[in-house]
């Protein structure tokens, strides 16, 4: 019985270790893949962020250049009018100033819009990637739960097998004891009968 128990325990340990190793291998490979994809994602994000910053800077410089060219045109126009009329009309000066302020507003709004679009795009990309990682994490958790369930079933089966072996041994032991007891009783009866016969013979 002791040998049978050790055999069942050894088989149980092998099966449990196989399940554990399968899960550990799966988790290691999955996490390695996740880490590789994360590094690639962060590299691409940094590269794309830099590209977007360059595009914003190019656009802002373009607007600033347009503004300076317009300012120069206004300055030349006001200079010519001043030379011809002796002074720049207030309406012209106000119009030029308003148009330059409008260009400042366009420049500022454009920069804010492009920066916001850049941030929104990055946020969306990160959310999508984080969701993909969450799916992988959930898969690992599911595999871990499944492995734990398999191990419980293996241990339960081993326990039932050992209990079954013990029950069989107890039944066999009870049968052996009963048989031995009957043999002893029969031997005692036979001995008693033999002793009685011998006693009668002596009396004769």
Image: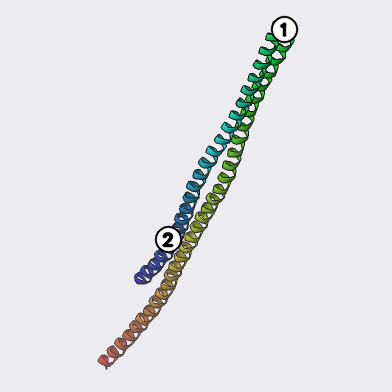
Return the residue found at the far top.
86
Quadrant including the C terminus: bottom left
Residue 46 in the image, given as x and y percentages of width and height: 51, 40
On screen, residue 115 above or below 196? above
Instruction: Give the residue drawn at x 41%, y 62%.
Output: 17
Give the side of residue 69 with respect to residue 92, left or right.
left
Contact, CB < 8 Å: mark 1 with mark 2?
no
Residue 183 location, quadrant: bottom left
Q: Quick one: 53 or 197, which is closer to the camera?
A: 53
Instruction: Give the residue drawn at x 55%, y 41%.
Output: 48
**Label whose residue precedes the other's in the sequence (1 or 2):** 2
Return the residue found at the far front.
84
Give the side of residue 147 with respect to residue 88, left or right.
left
Q: Which residue is mark 2?
A: 21
Q: Quick one: 82 or 125, which is closer to the camera?
A: 82
Q: Which residue is mark 1?
A: 85
Structural distance between the alpha carbons of marks 1 and 2: 94 Å
SS assignment at label 1: helix
Disc number placed over residue 116 in the picture, else none:
none
Return the residue found at the far right.
91
Residue 100 in the image, given as x and y percentages of width and height: 66, 19
How many numbered markers are drawn? 2
Q: Quick one: 119 or 136, which is closer to the camera?
A: 119
Closer to viewer: mark 1 or mark 2: 1
On screen, residue 153 above or below 52? below
């Amino acid at each position: 019985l002791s040998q049978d128990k050790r055999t069942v325990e050894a088989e149980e340990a092998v099966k449990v270790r196989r399940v554990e190793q399968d899960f550990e291998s799966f988790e290691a490979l999955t996490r390695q893949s996740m880490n590789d994809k994360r590094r690639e994602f962060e590299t691409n994000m940094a590269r794309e962020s830099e590209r977007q910053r360059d595009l914003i800077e190019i656009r802002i410089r373009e607007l600033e250049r347009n503004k300076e060219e317009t300012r120069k045109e206004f300055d030349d126009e006001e200079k010519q009018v001043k030379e011809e009329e002796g002074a720049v009309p207030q309406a012209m000066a106000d119009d030029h100033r308003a148009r330059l302020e409008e260009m400042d507003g366009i420049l500022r709004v454009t920069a804010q819009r492009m920066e916001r679009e850049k941030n929104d795009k990055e946020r969306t990309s990160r959310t999508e990637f984080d969701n993909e990682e969450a799916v992988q994490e959930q898969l690992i958790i599911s595999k871990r739960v499944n492995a734990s369930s398999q191990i419980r079933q293996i241990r339960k089966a081993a326990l039932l097998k050992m209990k079954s072996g013990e029950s069989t041994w107890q039944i066999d032991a009870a049968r052996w004891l009963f048989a031995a007891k009957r043999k002893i009783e029969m031997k005692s009866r036979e001995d008693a009968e033999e002793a009685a016969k011998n006693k009668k013979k002596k009396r004769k």
